[in-house]
Image: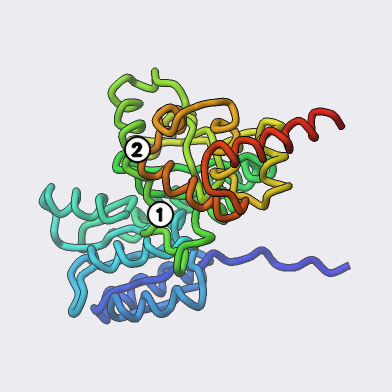
Amino acid sequence: MSVDPPRRNVALIVDDSPETLRLLTDALDGAGLTVMVALDGLSAIRIVEQITPDVILLDAVMPGIDGFETCVRLKRNVALANVPIIFMTGLSETQHIVRGLEAGGVDYVTKPIVIDEMLARIRVHLVNAQLANSARAALDITGRYLLAVNEQGRLIWATPQTYRLLAGPMAGGSQESLVLSPAQKGWLEAILQTGGDAPAIRTDFHDEQMTLSYMGRLGPSEILLRLAPDAPTPSRAELRKELRLTARESEVLSWLSKGKTNRDIAQILGLSPRTIDKHLEQIYAKLGVENRTAAAAVAAKIIDKGAGR
């Protein structure tokens, strides 16, 4: 029985210097990596649309868009979220190093490049990336909605089913567009201020009620969160099924049937009274009624029928 040869890791080198490209291509090929080359940032962005490298070596100073902006744009691609980017440059001042790390790089190597040091760094980052990918795949198998955000509430990574939940309705589903809402950011700020000593919150994700919980830090700027779907009460489930309401509309109608005022419902659900008014307008239209009394009567009848089954 034939055995497939081990897969070669793929390295993308982005540099406009022929000398640097020649040096690194020979060294990485000799170390068993498959090498791809881009002479500028835009070429690198086009390449990663076709193939996902395992590591990217990126020059900070290039014609056109520089390496820092190239890194930011590359990291918008969700497939590259866990791909290590190592900056290469003659710029060695602290502000340049910080800028590279803030752009999404994991390491910073100054020129002239010492090949043995570069290969050692690449091996370390490849192992770390592979471990992270394995851990996230294992997390996904558990069926839990897990995601990691930075301190500004922007998504760093998510398990596949979580990403589908977050990105589904968004145009293009780009990672850059996935940011916690203002209310969720406020909760995250409280978490960071208290060192994690803050309760989970109930929140809305595309018409689904979820509980958002803090799980801990994975790194200096990587915060692990968990989403858990709320189990609907029997009354909400019945209302949603029988009246073809959204999850939020069934929740509003359920509280309405219990005698809660619009202001009460707004406070319970963490919404504005104006938003509750709009939900009720939709509910009245779907039920074919004109006021809250009639809507409550319809709801009570369905809830009673469900309870008697």
Residue assigned mark 2? 183
Q: Image quadrant of residue 256? A: top right
Which residue is depicted at the point 47% across and 49% down? 157
Q: Is residue 263 above or below residue 75?
A: above
The residue shown at (34%, 61%) is 115
Q: Quadrant of residue 223?
A: top left
Name the residue type under label 2.
Ala
Three-letter amino acid code of the residue under disc 1: Leu
Crowd around label 2: few <14 · some 14–19 · many ≥20 (10 Å): few
Q: Is residue 21 left or right of residue 255?
A: left
Reading the image, the residue beneath label 1 is 178
Q: Position of residue 133 (x, y in %)?
A: 56, 49
Residue 220 appears at what percent x and percent y?
33, 35
Tell me where residue 34 appears, x and y as whole percent: 51, 72
Mark 1 secondary-structure assignment: loop
Quarter of the image where the C terminus is located? top right
Residue 307 horizontal side relative to residue 111, left or right: right
Report which quarter residue 294 is drawn in.
Answer: top right
Q: Nearer the viewer, residue 19 or 243?
A: 243
The kind of secondary structure element at disc 2 is: helix
Is residue 15 rendered to the left or right of residue 288? left
Q: Position of residue 254 (x, y in %)?
A: 60, 34
